Image (cartoon, rainbow, N blue to C red):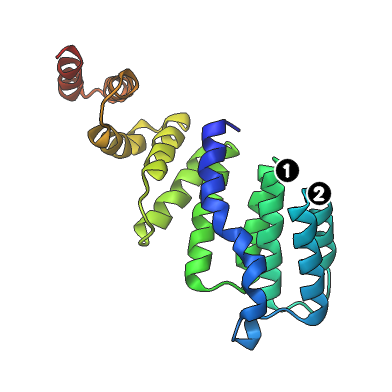
């Protein structure tokens, strides 16, 4: 996992830490923690704040096995498990936990949508380039916020998947918005145009490089 990718995903995961801080104030009875599970989660948050991430994760794995958890409780706990797994540099475990958070059925539509973007990024980071890129494209096509880092990830994912046709529109957007343009921008566009037989467009990039 590269430092750059980790920085991107940490930014995307930032909201998940809020899951533990707001549950006690939920007005909807279906989005509250019981006394038992609430106490356990509070203890978990204290462990995490003390830097005992593995102990916090172990506590949550115990909590998720409680039989009387409501969907909201399960979804929130799975989100926290995903966050802590990622902090422990276990991205595959994090991906699985976030997927379970959605499956548990306790998230609001916008919460689930945001988590889908996180999962797509983890898939790309875990080497699932095609599936991750398709998941991220699906998120964007359904109204998700098209952040610059998402464009970067899509370019890299499709290139890694060696699907240069799918990479091209994202790469062109990446190239057009780059300011200032650097050697890496010209090199990638030359590479894609060459592999796709788009000699005319490649010539334009070469001219731009020489100017």
Q: Specify whether 108 is left or right of 165.
A: right
Q: Is residue 89 visible?
A: yes
Looking at the rendered structure, the secondary structure element under dot 2 is: helix
Q: Classify 113 as above or below 52.
A: below
Mark 1 crowdedness (10 Å alpha carbons): few <14, some 14-19, many ≥20: some
In the current view of this chain or complex, which residue is farthest to the top?
210
Q: Classify 77 as above or below 72.
A: above
Which quadrant of the figure contains the C terminus?
top left
Q: In which quarter of the image is residue 37?
A: bottom right
Q: Is residue 64 visible?
A: no
The residue lying at 52 percent from left, 48 percent from top is 11
Residue 54 marker: 2
Which quadrant of the figure contains the N terminus?
top right
Residue 177 marker: none
Q: Quadrant of residue 87?
A: top right
Q: Nearer the viewer, residue 208 or 11?
A: 11
In the current view of this chain or complex, which residue is farthest to the front?
50
Could you say where residue 39 lies in the image, as x and y percent from the top left?
Answer: 81, 73
Q: Which is nearer the N-term, disc 2 or disc 1?
A: 2
Q: Specify whether 189 is left or right of 211.
A: right
Mark 2 crowdedness (10 Å alpha carbons): few <14, some 14-19, many ≥20: some
Mark 1 lies on residue: 88
The residue lying at 77 percent from left, 48 percent from top is 51
The residue lying at 54 percent from left, 45 percent from top is 9
Could you say where residue 18 lies in the image, as x and y percent from the top left?
Answer: 60, 64
The residue lying at 60 percent from left, 59 percent from top is 16
Looking at the rendered structure, the secondary structure element under dot 1 is: loop
Discs 2, 1 touching: Cβ within 8 Å? yes
Could you say where residue 184 lies in the image, as x and y percent from the top left?
Answer: 35, 21
């Amino acid at each position: 996992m590269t430092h750059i990718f980790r920085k991107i995903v940490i930014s995307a995961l930032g909201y998940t830490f809020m899951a533990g801080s707001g549950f006690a104030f939920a007005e909807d009875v279906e989005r509250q923690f019981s006394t038992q599970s609430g106490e356990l989660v509070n203890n978990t948050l204290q462990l995490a704040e003390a830097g005992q991430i593995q102990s916090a994760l172990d506590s949550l794995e115990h909590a998720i096995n409680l039989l009387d958890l409501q969907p909201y409780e399960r979804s929130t706990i799975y989100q926290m498990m995903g966050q802590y797994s990622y902090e422990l540099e276990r991205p595959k475990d994090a991906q699985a936990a976030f997927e379970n958070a959605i499956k548990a059925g306790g998230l609001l539509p916008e919460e689930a949508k945001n988590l889908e973007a996180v999962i797509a990024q983890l898939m790309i980071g875990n080497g699932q380039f095609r599936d991750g890129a398709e998941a991220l494209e699906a998120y964007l096509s359904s109204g998700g916020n098209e952040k610059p880092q998402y464009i970067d990830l899509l370019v890299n994912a499709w290139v890694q998947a060696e699907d240069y046709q799918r990479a091209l529109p994202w790469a062109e957007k990446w190239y057009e918005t780059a300011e200032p343009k650097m050697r890496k921008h010209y090199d990638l566009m030359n590479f894609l145009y060459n592999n796709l037989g788009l000699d005319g467009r490649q010539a334009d990039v070469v001219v731009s490089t020489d100017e």
